[in-house]
Amino acid sequence: MSFSSISELQQLHDFACKLARRAGQYLRGEQVRRQKQTLVTREKLNSVDLVTAADEGVEKLIRDAILAEYPEHAFIGEESYSAGEEKRFLLKDGPTWIVDPIDGTVSLEFIVPMTAISIGFCVNSIPTVGVVFAPFIGGSLYSAIHHSEGGAWLSEFGPTGPSTNLPIVSPPPPLPKDAPKGCLFFGEWGKDRRDSPQSNLVKKSSNFINMATEIGGRDGKGGMVHGIRSLGSSTMDMVYVASGQGDIMFEAGCWEWDVCGGIAILLQTGGIVVDSNPPANISDTDPIPMANIGGRRYLAIRGCSTDSDGRSPREQQEALVREVWKRTERLNYERPM
């Protein structure tokens, strides 16, 4: 399969949607069983970095189905990566599935519905098909094919089953004129909880305060965003911005499986994703490159239409990126070597 035609990508998309719903049914079953017993968790990095039997069960279900249907494809999953000895960035240019079986395991532990299954498919290291299923939020399924003939859709589970896929609105309205003022901002606290002045946790806290503070506050770093949301799931943060339900996602410390599916949806709806740290030596007029999907730092801006001043979507997005960079500290997240 060359993945050059929309029909080939549509086949992959439909397969991934059915697989995500199947995984969601498995996860709902786990929640029913959990009513009779305590959810058993294990710590990975620390007490907020958890894995459950459900994480491993959902990943096995997805992995086995993908490799049975597409045995020649590569597979990168959160739990198999975490359990393996190879910790380098594994994505190559060949067809690769990147899967987070459950993003929001802490939410799952506390029965908060903000939990998602993310299935992404990359060609030439670019997220090309994305499916994000939120089984406990009305069965919401966001999906996209990133292609000139593709699309982005939202379907929900109604009384008689899944509804027809509804196109995600495109193009969405212009960004707020004085952005980030008036924007809805998504960001996560992350798993790095070290208590030191230069820790990522302290820097993130400062960044959130900067973005929320009134214009002119904090030595000019105040952003006056309309609101800040931390959903406990980078996947849901990304997909809400991709679908125009938020304006900005600022994240660092997560991994490619947290964002791959959402990035495919974001790109298809006209959004951009760049490094949340400004690249070294970039000027005020240099074009801003796309984030490295394995770089662990992501700044996503939703798609938009031309504004009343005649600024193109990309001009508005890059202007907002630079305003966010002015108000945020550089975060240090490295990949294992």
Image: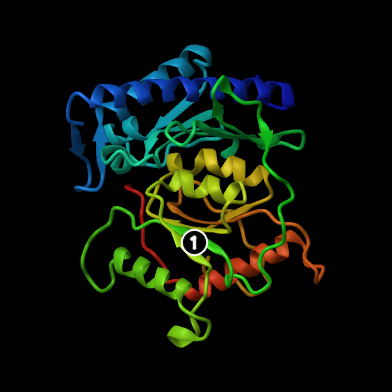
Coloured how?
rainbow
Relative image position of residue 293 (x, y in whole percent): 50, 46
Task: Please name the amino acid that badge 1 sits on.
Answer: Ser
Does residue 131 appear in this view?
no
Q: Tell me if 121 is positioned left or right of 29 in this view.
A: right
**The N terminus, quarter of image:** top right
| Residue plotted at (44% across, 56% down) | 251
Give the camera-side residue of 71 and 201.
201
Closer-to-camera residue (216/322) = 216
Which residue, given by chain and number where applicable, does mark 1 sit on? 276
- Please state which of residues 312 and 38 is positioned toward the viewer in this rendering: 38
Residue 217, given in percent of the width and then of the height, sits at 46, 85
Where on the picture, by quarter, is residue 307? bottom right
Horizontal arrangement in the rendering, residue 185 relative to residue 147 (left or right): left
Q: Quadrant of residue 314?
A: bottom right
Q: Is 50 drawn above or below residue 189 in the view shown?
A: above
Task: Return the residue found at the far top.
Answer: 68
**Which residue sits at x=37%, y=73%?**
206
Q: Which element is circle 1 on?
A: loop
Q: Residue at x 29, y 43 (%)?
A: 106
